[in-house]
Image: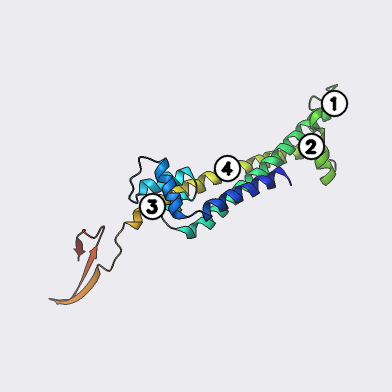
């Protein structure tokens, strides 16, 4: 089992443990860690929990349906970043060996200072055949770019999870009850449509047009 696969299995295991934990246990743990968080449900509490651990804010909001999507996105991005990083190291070492070896073959250098990376080059040759330093350099750059984009994606998903937890916690306290009514009444020159909408908490006031 390669190091990339081992890391991915470990990540999946940690995600499974988090998702299978009960909401009550998670909330109690959060209250013991974040002493400044009030006991009542709060958007700030959801934000802090989500910042501490991806998905914790969704558990705090009791929105468990979002967890598989969140962990799938993070797991896929982490796996891609790890694989691309391992391949990047392989091609970087192979490029350094081959670039210096070409100078040795042309008589510019008498000794290859990166001779220790020959095994990385041999691994690529075994799979694709002999290759010059230029394609190795291009592939190294592509892998580095892909790895960096995956890391940026992880940061974006993490940030979106925090934002989702914060906004969802706000919406949980938003009054969307049946305090909405429409009325059509006669009015000089035609009919008049009136709407009454209660906004905010149960103590809020109605609006009418």
Query: What is the C-alpha distance between the residues marked 1 and 2?
Result: 18 Å
The residue beneath circle 2 is 120
Front of the two marks 1 and 4? 4
Question: Mark 3 packing: few (<14 Cα in 10 Å), some, or many (20+)?
Answer: some
- Which disc is residue 151 wearing? 4
Q: What separation in Å lies between label 4 and label 2 (alpha carbons)?
A: 25 Å
In this rendering, the answer to whether 187 lies above or below 197 is: below
Report if the CB atoms under discs 1 and 4 are less than 8 Å apart: no
**How far apart are the two marked residues, 2 and 3, measured between alpha carbons?**
49 Å
Mark 3, residue position:
167
Q: CA distance from mark 4 to mark 3?
A: 24 Å
Residue 113 at x, y = what percent? Answer: 79, 24
| Left or right of 106 on screen, residue 34 | left
Residue for badge 1: 104
Q: Is residue 164 visible?
A: no
What secondary structure is marked by label 4? helix
Counting residues from the N terminus, which is met first, the one under dot 1 or under dot 3?
Answer: 1
- Residue 49 in picture, x, y percent from top left: 43, 46
Colour pattern: rainbow
Disc with the residue nearer the chain's start (1 vs 2): 1
Of mark 1 and mark 4, the one earlier in the sequence is 1
As drawn, the residue found furthest toward the top would be 110
Residue at 63% from the left image edge and 47% from the top image edge: 10
Q: Compared to 166, does 199 lie above or below?
A: below
Helix, strand or loop for disc 1: helix
Q: Secondary structure at mark 3?
A: helix
Q: Residue at x 19, y 60 (%)?
A: 205
Residue sitting at the far left? 188
How far is mark 1 from mark 3, CA to CA? Answer: 61 Å
């Amino acid at each position: 089992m390669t190091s990339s696969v081992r890391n991915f299995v470990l990540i999946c295991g940690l995600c499974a443990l988090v998702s299978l934990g009960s909401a009550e246990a998670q909330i109690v743990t959060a209250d013991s860690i974040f002493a400044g968080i009030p006991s009542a449900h709060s958007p700030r509490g959801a934000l802090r929990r989500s910042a501490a651990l991806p998905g914790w804010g969704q558990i705090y909001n009791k929105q468990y349906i979002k967890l598989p999507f969140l962990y799938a996105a993070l797991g896929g991005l982490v796996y891609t970043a790890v694989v691309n990083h391992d391949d990047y190291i392989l091609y970087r070492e192979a490029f350094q060996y081959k670039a210096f070896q070409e100078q040795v073959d042309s008589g510019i250098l008498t000794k290859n200072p990166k001779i220790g990376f020959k095994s990385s080059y041999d691994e690529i040759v075994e799979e694709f055949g002999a290759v010059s330093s230029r394609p190795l350099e291009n592939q190294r750059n592509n892998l580095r770019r892909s790895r960096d984009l995956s890391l940026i994606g992880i940061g974006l998903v993490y940030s979106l999870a925090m934002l989702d937890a914060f906004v969802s916690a706000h919406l949980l306290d938003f009054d969307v009850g049946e305090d909405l009514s429409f009325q059509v009444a006669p009015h000089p020159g035609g009919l008049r449509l009136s709407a009454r909408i209660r906004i905010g908490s149960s103590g809020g006031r109605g609006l009418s047009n």
